[in-house]
Amino acid sequence: MTTKNKLDKMFGPVGTSAGIFTFIAGLIMTYFALTGMILVLIGAFIGFSSTSTVIDFDKKRLKFTNNFFGIIPSGQWISIQADMKIGIQKSNTVWRAYSLSNRTLDIANNDYRLILYDANGNEIMPMQKSSHLDAAKLDLDKFSKQLGIGVI
């Protein structure tokens, strides 16, 4: 059984909005000129690219992927070893954008992430994100049992 956990957009919420706007403008422009396909490609890349983690419970392995254009995954599998551990980490990500009048737009994204650690306690990759600590604790117990590894 495999699960796919979506993590973040590559260019943040402001970049995603701008990419979708560029994508739609390129679609409209393609009706008038074929050069609009350049805007479609740029907008699709910026607007739909994201990151995710694929977990294969049967083979006990994980893959962190960058999903280009939202559909083309790239990444490599990491096998789970018995000395690896899972922990919860609070993530306080702030995306900042500037307007032409030097006003800032800050978008805060606070969540809890399940992180895979190696035997020395070094962070390997995020596995999943949850909006609440209780949900993250439940997923932590579930993943540690299914993968057969310890908890930090």
Image (tube, grey):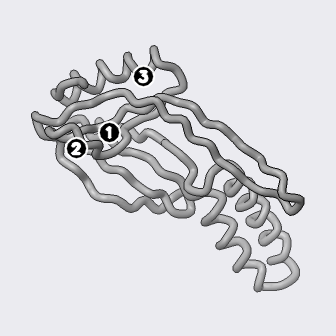
| In contact (CB < 8 Å): disc 2 and disc 1 | no
Q: Secondary structure at mark 3?
A: helix
Image side of residue 76 versus residue 26, left or right: left
Task: Identify which residue is drawn at 24% across, 38% down.
Answer: 117
Nearer-N-terminus badge (1/3): 1
Image quarter (top left, top right, bottom left or bottom right) of the C terminus: top left
Label 2, residues with CA under 10 Å away: few <14, some 14-19, many ≥20: some
Depth-wise, is mark 3 or mark 2 nearer the camera? 3
Residue type indicated by callout 1: Thr
Residue 96 shows up from this direction: yes
Task: Identify which residue is drawn at 61% across, 36% down.
Answer: 109
Residue type indicated by callout 3: Ala
Picture coordinates of residue 140, whole percent (x, y): 33, 23
Label 1, residues with CA under 10 Å away: few <14, some 14-19, many ≥20: few
The residue identified by callout 1 is: 2
Image side of residue 114 versus residue 123, left or right: right
Q: Secondary structure at mark 2?
A: strand
Task: Identify which residue is drawn at 48% across, 57% down.
Answer: 67
Residue type indicated by callout 2: Arg
Seen in the picture, residue 61 relative to 40 is either above or below; the reply is above
Image side of residue 93 versus residue 65, left or right: right
Depth-wise, is mark 2 or mark 1 nearer the camera? 2
Picture coordinates of residue 60, whole percent (x, y): 19, 39
Seen in the picture, residue 117 relative to 135 is either above or below; the reply is below
Seen from the viewer's position, the closer of residues 38 and 141 is: 141
Depth-wise, is mark 1 or mark 3 nearer the camera? 3
Picture coordinates of residue 38, whole percent (x, y): 70, 79
The residue identified by callout 2 is: 61
The residue identified by callout 3 is: 136
